[in-house]
Image (cartoon, helix red, strand yellow):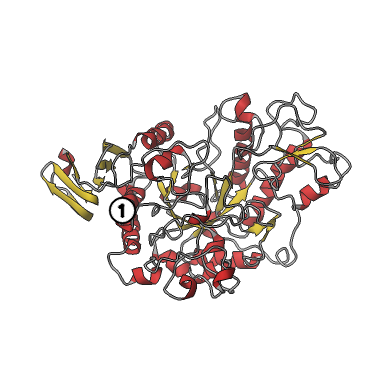
Amino acid sequence: MRHHPGLAARPPVRYTLAVAGSADWLRDAVLYEIYPQSFADSDGDGIGDLRGVIERLDHIASLGVDTLWFNPCFASPFVDAGYDVADYLRIAPRYGTNDDMVELVAKAGERGIRVLLDLVAGHTSVEHPWFQRELHAAGPDPEGDRYVWAAEEPRRAWSADLPGTPAWVPSPGPRPGWYLKNFYDEQPALNFGWATTDEPWRDAVTDPGPRRNVQALKDVMAFWFERGVAGFRVDMAFSLVKDDGAAARGNPLTAALWREIREWMDATHPGAVIVPEGDEPRTAGPLAFHADFLLVIKEEHASLFDNHAAGLLPFQEPRDPFFDAAGRGSTRPFLDAWNAIRDADPARPVILSTADHDFDRLCCGPRTAEQLGAALTFLFTWGSVPCLYYGDEIGMRYLPGLPEVEGSICNPAYNRSGCRTPMQWDDGPNAGFSAADPARLYLPVDPDPDRPTVAAQERDPDSTLHLVRRLVALRRATPALGGRAGTRVIHDGYPLAYLRGDTHLVVVNPRREPAGIGTPHARGAEPLLVHGVEVDGDAVSVAGFGYGVFAIG
């Protein structure tokens, strides 16, 4: 690991919210995801930065969230928007410095907000010094290769993550042979070993190269834990040991690797957390991660919200989402996935997001701001750990047809640019995001003259912004609406109705047409937050796009 002058000379900042005590805080958390390129630009270069986030911390705190999740902030050539890391121990200069991150963590901590970083564990950039060393070597590293190399293109190619491109890439340097990539060609896969070692180029998980990389993950994590970071969301967490899933169900060798890291964390940084990209495979051993993540790009989340404005990836099937005005969707795919996770461990935290950097926003395609109330009410009262994607608190929309920027069009049929546009702060130039010339912006600002902004919605008590604040405040004030009480569905169609902790009733109707149910749980219900819902004895009538939260019993 390479260390950085100036940081090593002073004691690391200790962030007591993160490193002391138990990681149980995650069960009560409300997350806010920041795509750093697009949040706030403090220096006028057209790209968001950490100083911009620091200047906007009061807005974030006003939402009631208590955890920030940043997409990758580390030094990178940005072929894949920072998911191609060239130095895990240095903040990318476009965002600022390591000192800026330390300051951000400290100032967020003063507001009761923790910080999670994205850890790209399975691959690096081709520009990382580790890869450059092996690329320019005559043969295998005597300490053990950090990457997966083969003298000739393997007969049995490992399946690629990106359809239509090869998984093996010819060496572009002096070292002969081929290297394995994880996603783009510029993202060589780190070597954590193979489940089957029947080829000479396949290391076992116990070989020197894989063990060097496991230690490197610990070193990277420790470096940022010591600077106050509360944990990591791990990108492609179960891509590490190759052929693991094919050789045995549940990726057992990768799971064992993460259990080793979790045991180290519990001993050295017991208040910190790790969260995987997706849900953790169940194996015979204990779970390594502190939560599951019902990913927005996968079936369980897509069945709720995805109207395919960004397009479809090859593994996705078009379906009518449940939260849609037409009212043709179903909650069953989501409920089946939720129940599969919670049945084995009812206390298991499960993160559910409004959207993210890879996915349509809530407000996309024909979905309008009027429809957001039902979706937001569900997300903040369901019993998951909710994650609010930046801009969703004001109903920013997904913008179709934007240009490819830093790998955003990862498949010809799928464009991620539209969910990565600049945050809309006010009616000033570039919506208050940046003082740069518009031509220099990372991505264009929404050109709609009626685009929502934070400033305008601050003045409107009926805005999406104020609804988000009310929902988070209600969740905070009502433990039964948080992540610890049980959730029991009493009607899984339109309207969706469920009980939280047997003391609260929630009903949401995402469709345009009214809906209703009869339930004895409605008798004497006390409205806490209601829009378009009427209760008369056992009868609950919900207007189109209506929602309501009630105290019962």
Q: Position of residue 223 (x, y in %)?
A: 66, 55
User: Is residue 547 among the parts visible in the rendering?
Assistant: no
User: Is residue 455 among the parts visible in the rendering?
Assistant: yes
Q: Position of residue 216 (x, y in %)?
A: 71, 47
Numbered marks: total:
1
Residue 279 to residue 272: above or below: above
Residue at 56 percent across and 51 percent down: it is 231
Q: Which residue is mark 1?
A: 371
The quadrant of the image that shows the C terminus is top left
**In front of the other: 415 or 456:** 415
Q: Position of residue 203 (x, y in %)?
A: 76, 32
419 sits left or right of 153 in the view: left
393 sits left or right of 239 in the view: left
Q: Position of residue 239 (x, y in %)?
A: 62, 38
Residue at 47 percent across and 65 percent down: it is 423
Q: Residue furthest right?
A: 138
Residue 28 to residue 209: above or below: below
Residue at 75 percent across and 53 percent down: it is 127
Tell me which corner region of the image, top left, top right, bottom left or bottom right, holds residue 42. bottom right
Tell me which corner region of the image, top left, top right, bottom left or bottom right, holds residue 175. top right
Label 1 secondary element = helix
Amino acid type at image mark 1: Gln
**In front of the other: 428 or 483:** 428
Q: Residues within 10 Å of mark 1 (few under 14, many from 20)?
A: many
